[in-house]
Amino acid sequence: MPNESSAPLFNIQIDGVWHQVPKGTRVIEACARIGVFVPRYCYHKKLSSPGNCRMCLIEMGFPRLGPDRKPERGSDGKPIINWIPRPQISCAQDVSEGMAVRTNSPLVKECQRGVMEFLLINHPLDCPICDQAGECRLQEFSVDFGNSKSRFLENKVKKPKNVVLGPRVTLDDERCILCSRCIRFCQEIAHDDVLGFVDRGSYTVLTAHSGKRLENNYSLNTVDICPVGALTSTDFRFKMRVWFLKETKSICTSCATGCNTIIGTREDVIYRQTPRENDHVNSCWMCDYGRLNFKFLEAENRLLEPQIRSDGKLIAADWPAAISEASLQLKQFTGNEIAIVASGRMTNEELWLTSQLAKSLGVQWIDIVPRREPGDDILLSEDRNPNTNGARLILGSTSEPGAKLMAIAEAVKSGEIKALVMLKENAMHLGMPVEQLAQLPVFIVMNILAYEATQKATVVLPACGFAEKRGSMINGKGRLQRLNRAARPPGNARDDWEILRDLLQAVGGGDSLSSSDDVFRRISETVPHFAGLSVSKIGDLGVHILRMKELPPTHPRDEKAIAQAVAIQARRRAVGRKVHEARKALGVRRD
Amino acid sequence: MAITVPRPKLNWRERLYMPAIVAGLAITFKHFKNMLLGRTKVTMQYPEQKWDSSLPDHYRGAPALVRDEDGRVRCVACQLCEFICPPRAIKIVSGEIPSKDRFAKVEKYPEAFDIDMIRCIFCGMCEEVCPEQAIFLRKDYAITGFTRADMVHHKEKLLEIGGVMHGVVLKWNEKK
């Protein structure tokens, strides 16, 4: 797409009406701009146009030029059009001055019907089992542009079914209509050229290069752009029909990129996440890691009930009891004996309530857990916390988020800190043995899942995951984006902001806040970057609020502390992986 | 707008009323006589007697899953019946047929198929919407149970009611 403001406008005639479109626009896009839909299979606006499906055929013409090379005008003063006698594809042609197109003439309709008939010749009639049914372009266009009956009497061509292309993608070659979108995606976006067509004519099949697999971290995008059910997600395959899914617009919280997503749920069960177009953030794509990172919400070790330690054991309690117990425990100590470890996975609202909690308790020791892993130069960010920037703006710390964590760990070890509040983080990230955490007189945990250290807590507060709450986060490039609730939390787990608000009120610091939007309003009043904003003003595509270039560079001392914290996590992950592999080798199941 | 209904003009015989009363009483006495002679039967002694044999072909009883001549459960868990079911009586969990299976080509089957017969309204939409000719309304009408759980027909029960269906389209053969 050309730069709209600078490109000169061309006059083009679409279905008899003249319009102005910027230079460099493809004809198919020009038609879309004025609300005329041209059917297409191979064309995708973010990929190149090979023009191989022939579905977007239209009639095209140019003004007749007189001897003076000027367009000749008819009696109505409009240029006379010389129509090209055969149909043209609209996806690979840019607009030009005076161009005319017809998208609904008898010839175009006949072409569309013919193309549909060819595409359906060998296509299996297995819509009842096909995962694409309901969002299948072939189904839709067959109704809109095709015939109701097949004239094909011969046997259909047999092709491989259930082909495992990679760890996450399964291919059904019979359903493939050879549009080559997936091939182009792998070449142009994922830079991992593994797919291609082999054999000829009606025996052409899509396959991976011999000895290679479609296993790059963006492989599941090929499933999204596949217009039919040929490429299927191994994870989602046969799980749920798409028309049952409630679609909630949200964002991915697996790294600082914050790809815009649609979460598909049915009756509070999440079935899939798909990318949502946002040209400021993720274009039309998202990585497989983020896309599949929602299973933990249904894990076995999900915390379902608030718990209070009594006589050395954790006993299930109700919410008012757990909150008042937590506040009583905290009030025993002065501010400099308490440490709060928050999380870069919390929303701005939750972080703000955390900072208020710290303020009302007089806590100085407050920070988040830094989380860094190798990223790539497509979408995946090195910073795996989705809201580091939110912590930077809201927690009010002068150092880089995460830089104080090791100092907090040292203070816990030395006994200087007597009460530790872990919010949405595993206390093992502090890098000390569980026994040492068990020594703490007060150890309050608010989290989604139970870990080893959770057993040593004095109060456990079960909270919500990213798909279960509404809120806002600031991505790595400073864009404020919105999360929406797609599912209700299981058991007695509660929205994080409510837990924090109640805790804040119980320690005597809060006033009435009745929704997370109220909290956001309070942030917009106190944090300058948020001034004038509200949750509804963020919109589905987000607002840019923070210029990353204007931030001061990170102090080397902070860098070192963060690297240290990250190294602890990496070590723990490596051990976890080894244990997992050993278990797998022995054939021991986790549960 | 009010409509004026014209009263019928009665002739002198009709105005007497007596002939009509006599004719009516004659019918009453005819039935009375037939009753005394045991010729008329009014009440069917259900459940000792049942009307099963006289149910019409289009009767809509309990929905059931059928197998075809090959013994395959025809349902492929497309969930269209679950979608169309007005009282939401149907719950399906789908599964994948392993590649070694005889019917591996079909790929998908219902791992669980529950119809809550308390909810079912016998409307027959499931049968109508089924693209696989897998679910039919049979002639069973006396669906009973002691608990709510009893009233849920699981897959086994549905297949038991359904039995084998002959003459259905075999679309999953190798040629198609």
Image (tube, rainbow, N blue to C red):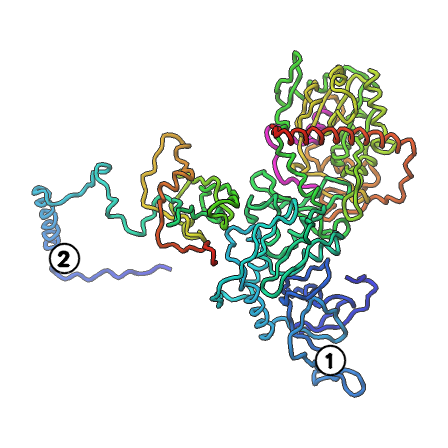
Across and down, in percent, residue B20 comes to 12, 54
Q: Chain of mark 2?
A: B
The disc at residue A188 is none
Q: Is residue B84 at all visible to an observer of this figure?
A: no
- The numbered mark at residue A63 is 1
Q: Residues within 10 Å of mark 2 (few under 14, many from 20)?
A: few
- Classify A393 as above or below A69: above
Residue at image x 71%, y 48%? A218
Circle count: 2
| In front of the other: A183 or B9 | A183
Task: Single out the mark in the foreground, 1 or 2.
Answer: 1
Q: Position of residue B83 (x, y in %)?
A: 49, 47
Asked which quadrant contains residue B36, the reply is: top left
Q: Which residues are magenta?
A: A483-505
| Quarter of the figure with residue A484 | top right
| The N terminus of chain A: image quadrant | bottom right
Residue indicated by mark 2: B15
Q: Against A117, is A72 above or below?
A: below
Rounded to the nearest whole Å, what is the CA distance between mark 1 and mark 2?
Answer: 91 Å
- Residue A424 locus on image (x, y percent): 72, 29
Residue B44: image location, x then y, percent: 20, 41
